[in-house]
Image (spheres, rainbow, N blue to C red):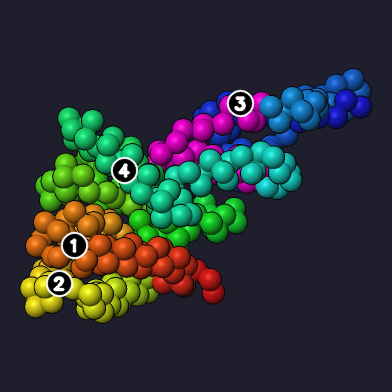
Amino acid sequence: MDYGVGLEMGLRGEWEDVLISRGNVVISATAGGGGVQVFRVHNYWSLRRSCISTLPFERFHPDTPSRIGGVLKLATKDQIEHLRSQIVKHIGTDWPSTPSHWDVLEDHIESTKRRNRTDSIFDTRPPEPAAAIRLARGCNIPGILPAAFYHLSRIHPEMDWGECRGVTVPLELLSNLRKGERSARWDLLDKRDLMLLLHGIRNIQWSEVIIYESMETFTAECTNAKGCHTIIKSFCRRRDKQDRDPLAYLRDRFTSSRLIADKLCDKCATTISTCVQRNRQTFWEELPNLFRLSS
């Protein structure tokens, strides 16, 4: 008997749902001599090369998790480790594990946004977090969860992916999209992950308070103690409580040049900038705990 499975990764239509979403392969065969069904087996290495060459490996795209999720499940199920590791590595570029790589990604997205000012809905371009979280849960990719949860925490609950792409989009949502705000596929999250998100948002707020309060201890060698102290207090009070992106705020607001422009003495500006960036690194490392992802 000629055993085998013919796998065509380019299949579309109803077969795509069967093959891709479940990570399984449906086998069908025509009857051979004597009514016995014959299955054709492709060479393993040819199959593997076919899988790799046809994967939709587009970086920084909101539909990447749904496009490659089925292939990843298939690679996991059949223990094709090289293929699985290649997919996981690709997904990891969309959801970095270090703050420096996160900054590179954010800068890339902002640069793309500036180059596409005529695009009324920029949200169709960058990675989308809820789909990434669902993929991570279903395919055991915990490394992308901190970045995905953090990004999700920056998105307003009213910014629903489906509603923002409906036939009639509410004017407020359309206005937000045109300002560059992002949306999420909230319906992909289960109750557990929604609760983890809420815990994370609250814990982030407390973490920010600790970072800002610690600034008062950075002025020991200040050459203008009264003036610097007043300035530090003032811009901490002016901190926008509705801002949902502390990583961006801490990076951009507390550079030495900006602090000197705020009339802080050189010593305070350098010390505060260095300490805030160190605290920002610690904040990033704490994301798994802030969102209770370690439990």
Q: Residue at x 20, y 68 (%)?
A: 268
Q: Please state the extent of the stretch shown in magenta in the rendering.
A: 50-75
Q: Residue at x 16, y 45 (%)?
A: 179
Amino acid type, callout 2 = Thr
Question: Which residue reaches farthest top?
Answer: 33
Quadrant of res 40? top right
| Crowd tier of the residue under label 4, counting other residues whose Cα lies within 10 Å: few below 14, some 14–19, many 20 or above | few
> Of callouts 4 and 3, which one flags the residue occurring earlier in the amino acid sequence?
3
Relative vertical location of residue 235 with respect to residue 154 in this rendering, above or below: below
In contact (CB < 8 Å): disc 1 and disc 2? yes
In the rendered structure, the answer to whether residue 41 lies left or right of residue 100 reads right
Q: In terms of secondary structure, where does tag 4 sit?
A: helix
Of callouts 3 and 2, which one flags the residue occurring earlier in the amino acid sequence?
3
The earlier-in-sequence mark between 1 and 2 is 2
Q: Which residue is mark 3?
A: 53
Of circles 4 and 3, which is in front?
Answer: 4
Q: Quadrant of residue 81?
A: top right
Inter-mark Cα distance, 4 to 3 = 29 Å
Dot 3 amino acid type: Ser
Q: Which residue is mark 1?
A: 266
Q: Nearer the viewer, residue 169 or 157?
A: 157
Helix, strand or loop status at disc 2 = loop
User: Gap in Å between the C-alphas at discs 1 and 2?
Assistant: 8 Å
Residue 166 at x, y = what percent?
25, 43
Q: Please tell me how crowded label 1 is: few (under 14), some (14-19), or many (20+) other residues with Cα within 10 Å.
A: some
- Does the residue at mark 3 contact the one at mark 2 (Cβ under 8 Å)? no
- 57 within the magenta span: yes
Quote the CA–CA distance across marks 2 and 4. Answer: 35 Å
Q: Which residue is mark 2?
A: 223
